């Protein structure tokens, strides 16, 4: 396949140098003037994928193992070990993370981004099949940390703290660990055995658990502060919002999405459910509720206050819900929950119309607020109404920490102001991605470790993020992104099988080869080949990313090495005025 022409490279390749002698040195041809006063420097940068990853994973490092740039006897294992250094849940996140890393991937400016999420899915599965354990705990420090909340933030913090050698005890009000990953995400998205395996690996490091214990009811926060050397609050946001319309409160069959999904996790297919379930909301949780209702044998409908193109759910979640039989009502508002002798009998709705310019909320960043009722009511038959309109925290028992606010407030080190031993993270700060909660847990653990060791809080120095404009992306031939397939169940009722299928090992390796190693040399030899002064040498046995060296006595600052560097690792510096 012929790559698209690059005028700069064509010029450099076809250029015929005039005659010169060894003594003319800096008078030799220079691409940007007689003398540029700049020579190449080698700058290891943060790739944009890692910069966009809330968990801070070394995605470039993962792909370098898989594609052979970094040698390994077992590339899949090395890639997994690189992933779990930051995130102990690669198999789970490879299934459910909305992968903001891929939005930042510079490969997307060339053809398509690298399928980072699919690669993570594959290496996570490999580790489970191979029975790989997490890195073991560090030497015992004698310090004890209480982690309140066994969701992704608390588990992430516990994992990183055990790696440092601190004793950790998790307190959780539920009967099982996992938080909203367990109680809010259905088995057809994450097989329960996958989640249980990745959680059990953390517990196997020696983490103690106290389940069914609610802080503020069974033990006070002040008692934990006195008993432990530090406390991490990762209580999450596990309270669903009720629908603020007449007839919802107190009516049998009217509930919120969080309670609905949690009840299913506790009761399974025996959970009582209506024959016609109507879900109010437009996000992924609304789709999950509808799809679960279908699997339990009910009819399901979703009522969205906004048009299809403004719904918050992911495209694949919407498509799956629609294909499985969910009825959709777009741009529809709810007016009242109708009730009868047995509870909910229906939902009174109204079509919505866009507000005119100048009307209150017409340009609101919240799509729903940009619409108003048209005044034309209609009824939808239902015997169960589920509000999927958001979630909030339950700070009962923690009032002394939040001072009446619904969320925790922490500083840049995830420490709670005025409480030296207290740190916090996850959805207790703001409802966000599960990957964000994992990142909070790791960063808070770093701060807790520094506190316990009497060291200054960790610094997070700025590191330049690789810009695609500094890369020669035409080095890479266009290759389509690998796509995972999703099973389409023939029979939805009673089918809780996982639907998203992983890439094969060969597909995973091929997809990793699409990684451009942004910001770090991968020994492509472009700079050596194009240098007209033969000033650049390779050293095969050098450390990762340090394969080339410039003899500055020969360099005349022609910039060609920088222009042809596919990874953007080579920049121009060391000149006058710098």
Image: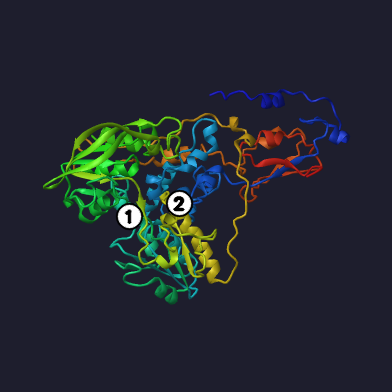
Which of discs 1 and 2 lies nearer the camera? The answer is 1
Mark 1 and mark 2: span between their CA atoms?
A: 19 Å
Is disc 1 surrounded by few (<14), some (14 to 19) or many (20+) residues within 10 Å?
some
Q: Which residue is drawn at 22% across and 38% down?
A: 348
For the C terminus, give its image quadrant: top right
Label 1, secondary structure: give it. strand
Q: Of the residues under marks 1 and 2, which one precedes in the sequence?
A: 1
Q: Is residue 120 left or right of residue 418?
A: left
Figure check: 538 above or below 457: above
- The structure residue drawn at horizontal position 28% and vertical position 45%, both measured from the top left corner, is 188
In the rendered image, the vertical position of residue 398 relative to residue 575, given as above or below: below
Does residue 502 appear anywhere in the picture? yes
Position above or below: 462 against 33? below
Between 394 and 273, the one nearer to me in the picture: 394
Q: Mark 1 points at which residue?
A: 239
Extreme residue in the right direction: 23
Task: Point out residue 173 in the picture as x, y percentages from the top left corner.
Answer: 31, 64
Which one is nearer the viewer's eye here, 166 or 506? 166
Where residue 470 is drawn, which disc sits there? none
> Observer-nearest residue: 58 or 338?
338
Q: Which residue is denoted by mark 2 in the rendering?
A: 436
Q: Judge by depth and name the residue closer to the eye, 79 or 218.
A: 218
Residue 338 screen position, x and y as percent: 19, 42
Which residue: 41% across, 54% down? 427
């Amino acid at each position: 396949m012929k790559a698209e022409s690059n005028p700069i490279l064509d010029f450099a390749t076809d250029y015929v140098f005039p005659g010169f002698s060894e003594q003319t040195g800096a008078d030799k041809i220079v691409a940007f003037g007689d003398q540029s006063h700049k020579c190449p420097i080698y700058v290891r940068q943060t790739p944009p994928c890692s910069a966009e990853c809330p968990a801070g994973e070394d995605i470039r490092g993962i792909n370098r193992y898989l594609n052979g740039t970094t040698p390994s006897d077992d590339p899949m294992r090395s890639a997994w070990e690189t992933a779990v250094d930051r995130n102990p849940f690669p198999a789970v996140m490879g299934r459910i993370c909305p992968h903001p890393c891929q939005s930042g991937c510079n490969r997307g400016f060339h053809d398509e981004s690298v399928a980072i999420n699919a690669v993570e899915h594959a290496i996570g599965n490999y580790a489970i099949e191979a029975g790989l354990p997490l890195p073991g705990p560090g030497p015992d420090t004698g310090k004890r940390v209480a982690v309140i909340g066994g969701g992704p933030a608390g588990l992430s913090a516990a994992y990183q703290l055990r790696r440092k050698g601190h004793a950790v005890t998790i307190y959780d009000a539920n009967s099982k660990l996992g938080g909203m990953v367990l109680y809010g995400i259905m088995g057809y998205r994450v097989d329960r055995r996958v989640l249980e395996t990745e959680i059990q690996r953390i517990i196997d490091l020696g983490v103690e658990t106290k389940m069914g214990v609610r802080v503020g009811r069974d033990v006070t926060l002040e008692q934990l502060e006195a008993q432990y050397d530090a406390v991490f609050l990762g209580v999450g946001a596990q309270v669903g919002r009720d629908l603020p319309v007449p007839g919802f409160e107190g009516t049998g069959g009217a509930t919120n999405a969080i309670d609905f999904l949690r009840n299913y996790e506790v009761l399974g297919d025996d959970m009582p459910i209506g024959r016609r379930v109507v879900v109010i909301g437009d996000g992924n949780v609304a789709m999950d509720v509808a799809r679960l209702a279908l699997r339990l044998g009910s009819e399901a409908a979703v009522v969205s206050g906004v048009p299809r193109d403004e719904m918050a759910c992911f495209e694949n979640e919407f498509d799956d819900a629609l294909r499985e039989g969910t009825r959709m009502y777009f741009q529809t508002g709810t007016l009242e929950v109708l009730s009868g002798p047995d509870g909910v009998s229906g939902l009174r709705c109204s079509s919505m119309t866009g507000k005119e310019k100048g009307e209150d909320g017409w340009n609101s960043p919240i799509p729903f607020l940009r619409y108003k009722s048209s005044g034309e009511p209609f009824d939808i038959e239902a015997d169960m109404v589920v509000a999927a309109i958001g979630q909030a925290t339950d700070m009962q028992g923690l009032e002394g920490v939040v001072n009446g606010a619904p969320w925790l407030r922490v500083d840049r080190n995830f420490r709670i102001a005025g409480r030296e031993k207290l740190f916090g993270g996850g959805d207790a700060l703001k409802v966000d991605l599960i990957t964000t909660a994992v990142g909070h847990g790791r960063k808070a653990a770093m701060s807790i470790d520094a506190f316990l060791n009497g060291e200054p809080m960790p610094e997070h120095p700025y590191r330049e993020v690789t810009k695609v404009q500094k890369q020669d992306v035409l080095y890479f031939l266009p290759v389509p992104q690998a796509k995972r397939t999703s099973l389409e169940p023939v029979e939805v009722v009673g089918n809780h099988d996982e639907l998203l299928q992983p890439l094969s090992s060969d597909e995973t390796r091929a997809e990793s080869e699409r990684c451009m190693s942004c910001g770090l040399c991968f020994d492509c030899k472009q700079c050596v080949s194009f240098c007209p002064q033969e000033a650049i040498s390779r050293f095969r046995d050098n450390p990762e990313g340090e394969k080339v060296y410039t003899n500055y006595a020969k360099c005349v600052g022609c910039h060609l090495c920088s222009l042809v560097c596919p990874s953007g690792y080579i920049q121009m510096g060391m000149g006058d005025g710098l």
